[in-house]
Amino acid sequence: MKMKLGQRCNCTNPECGCGVIVARTSEFEGASNPRCCCSSVMKKPNVRPISRWNSHRLATTDRL
Ligand SMILES: [Zn+2]
């Protein structure tokens, strides 16, 4: 996965919830996603279906 400067990556493990921001880019493009300290894969938040679920839950809270 090619990393961009300032790009956020979140851990896919919901029990971990770790997030990182890229502070320095690399020319090396690995075949797989970076991994978290908990050994789960880290992904961009916009490709995670769970982030859509979270925004839906926030919208529900606003109505209360
Ligand atoms: Zn993690």
Image: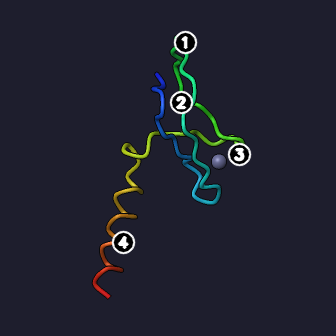
The residues bearing labels 2 and 4 have C-alpha atoms spaced at a distance of 28 Å
Q: Which comes sooner in the sequence, label 1 or label 2?
A: 1
Residue under numbered circle 2 = 33
The disc, 3 or 4, on the residue closer to the chain's N-terminal end is: 3
Graded by Cα atoms within 10 Å as few (under 14), some (14 to 19) or many (20 or more), the crowding at tag 4 reads: few
Specify the quadrant that holds the C terminus: bottom left
SS under mark 4: helix
| Element assignment for label 1 | loop
Q: Quadrant of residue 51?
A: bottom left
Mark nearer the N terminus (2 vs 4): 2
In the rendered view, does 43 fall on the left or right side of 63?
right
Residue 45 place in picture, x, y as percent: 43, 46
Residue type pointed to by label 4: Leu
Q: In the displayed structure, would residue 61 be above or below residue 18?
A: below
- Residues marked 1 and 2 touching at CB (< 8 Å): no
Nearest to viewer (mark 3 / mark 4): 4
What kind of residue is marked 1? Phe
Q: Is mark 1 within 8 Å of ligand 1?
A: no
Amino acid tagged 2? Asn
Q: Of tags 1 and 2, which is closer to the observer?
A: 1
Is tag 3's residue or tag 1's residue first in the polypeptide sequence?
1
Marks 2 and 3, how far apart in space? 14 Å
Q: Does the beta carbon at disc 3 come under 8 Å from ligand 1?
A: yes
How many numbered discs, if any?
A: 4
Q: Secondary structure at mark 3?
A: loop
Q: Residues within 10 Å of mark 3 (few under 14, many from 20)?
A: few
Q: Is 57 on the left or on the right of 11, as rendered?
A: left
Q: Secondary structure at mark 2?
A: loop
Q: Which residue is mark 4?
A: 58
Residue 28: give its label: 1
Tag of residue 38: 3
